Amino acid sequence: MKLWNVFRMEIFKNLHDRISLFVMIILTCLNIIGGLVVSNQRWMRTPSVVEESMMWLFVLSVFATAVFLFIYPYQMARTDYKNNVMSLKIASGVSRAQYYFVKVGATLLFSFISFTLLAILPIVIVLIATGGIEVAPADVYIELGEAGAAFGVIIFGWLSTFFTLMTSVIIARGKGYTIFVFFGISIASSQIMNIVRGLLGFQWWDMDTTIMLIQHLFTIIVVAVIGILILRRQDL
């Protein structure tokens, strides 16, 4: 089987996950409505019962969104283990390393789409509907380089978490204790990096964005290699 066909199968399977898509649509709507309510300054004075209820609903929606953004890639990553179809894909001629990168690519794509729908889209709609947020330029002044570096730290931090989750799914074969493996790897990698920083003479308050980027990049590479090596030796 060609690698492109495997990727298309992953896309087709994720697009037909109706439960996840339904939850995504509901949370997107709640985030938009809640964001519009929050941006309406009138509730700051004497909020009505409806506005107060919408505020609490918005808080719950944000919490549910954060949980969903973690669970969604986990569900996608463990599907082939859960359905016992991974061995069939490997037997069709796709190498395990190729399968790993296809799975990572498809899961990353849909994770980004879910983040865009659940977080970025509601923010954009609320800003357009309310005409933006007026603040003093001095209050929001950030050098372009600093903003880019901070954004890079966020992206690489997210990728570090993502690859750690993928490796945890492989180690646990998609079973329920994957979450414990994930936290175990996260804690272990954090402690290792603390030891390395200590040996190099850095303290946590000395950390700048460049060092944090290097730390996240190193974590991504290490956990990705561990995931591939374990998958190549796993008895499917």
Image: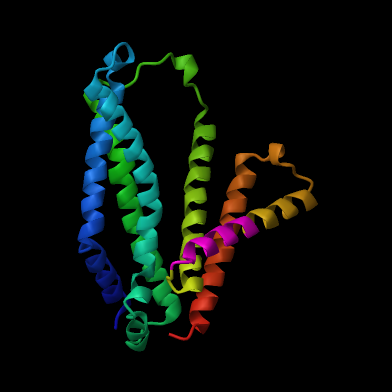
Per the rendered image, the range of residues in magenta is 176-188
| Residue located at (27% from left, 28% from top) | 53
| 213 in relation to 145, above or below | below
Report whether 113 appears left or right of 195: left
Q: Residue 144: percent from the left, percent from the top?
A: 49, 31
Report whether 139 appears left or right of 7: right
Q: Is residue 127 visible?
A: no
- In-front residue for pair 164/183: 183
Report whether 17 appears left or right of 187: left
Q: Is residue 182 magenta?
A: yes
Majority SS type along the magenta span: helix
In the picture, residue 98 is in which quadrant? bottom left
Q: Residue 106: percent from the left, percent from the top?
A: 33, 64
Q: Residue 145: percent from the left, percent from the top?
A: 53, 34
Q: Is residue 168 visible?
A: yes
- In-front residue for pair 199/77: 77
In the rendered image, the quadrant that contains the C terminus is: bottom left
| 16 in relation to 43, above or below | below
Extreme residue toward the top, this view: 45
| 155 in relation to 188, above or below | above
| Residue located at (43% from left, 13% from top) | 136
Q: How is the image coloured?
A: rainbow
In the picture, residue 78 is in which quadrant? bottom left
Q: Is residue 121 magenta?
A: no
In the rendered image, the quadrant that contains the N terminus is: bottom left
| 11 in relation to 192, above or below | below
| Residue located at (49% from left, 15% from top) | 138
- In-front residue for pair 16/207: 16
Report whether 83 appears left or right of 141: left
